[in-house]
Image (cartoon, rainbow, N blue to C red):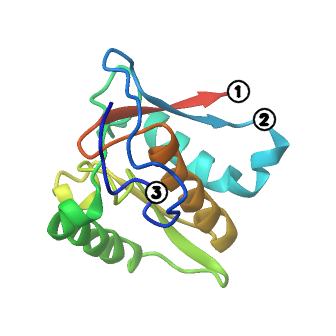
Amino acid sequence: MDSADYMFVLNPHFYHEGSIFANVQLVFYYDMNNSYFNVMLEAFQHHKDALTSPGSLIPGIQGRPPLTRMYSKYDLVQYNVNRKAKDAACSKLSKPERYECDKFPFASTYEGAGIGDGRFSVRYIPRAANNTHGRWLAPWYAYDRILHKDQFYIGFNE
């Protein structure tokens, strides 16, 4: 059991404690062919392209280093450095109307844009795709008990 008191802070009806499994490889799966997730397809595709394009060294896919979750309130400085680096990279791109700049790896990981090694990707995607993906990632962290400094991968169900 863990007692991560930062889990479910927005919903007091959930318990803050939870079971964890120590010998499991954590994978956040993107279900690329499930129409339920269509609104997020452009986010999924951006992350897949970032991870699988020829020569990519971006961490987060099996066979490379994993991503490491960063709970922003435990490391607000690095979280803000990630966001600032993402904003700088996005400012160099043309922004279509109703689009937002998506980044991969996520700002909520220690491998985000602020690490300074250039192993990240930014792309403008529809605002709905970006916002929905963010609202999907946060509950995954919570429900699957992905705690601060836990490592995980991105997987693609196709």
- C-alpha separation, residue under disc 3 versus residue under disc 1: 31 Å
Whether the residues at callouts 2 and 1 have beta carbons within 8 Å, the answer is yes
Work out whether residue 142 or residue 112 is closer to the camera in this orientation and state it.
142
SS assignment at label 1: loop
Residue placed farthest to the right in the image?
35
Q: Position of residue 27 (x, y in %)?
A: 47, 29
Callout in the foreground (2, 3): 3
Q: Residue at x 58, y 61 (%)?
A: 135
Amino acid type, residue under disc 3 in the picture: Phe
Amino acid type, residue under disc 2 in the picture: Asn
Q: Is residue 157 above or below residue 53?
A: above
Q: Which residue is mark 3?
A: 8
Q: Which residue is mark 1?
A: 158
Q: Which residue is mark 2?
A: 33
Closer to the chain start, of discs 2 and 1, is 2
Work out whether residue 51 or residue 33 is closer to the camera in this orientation and state it.
33
Work out whether residue 27 or residue 55 is closer to the camera in this orientation and state it.
27
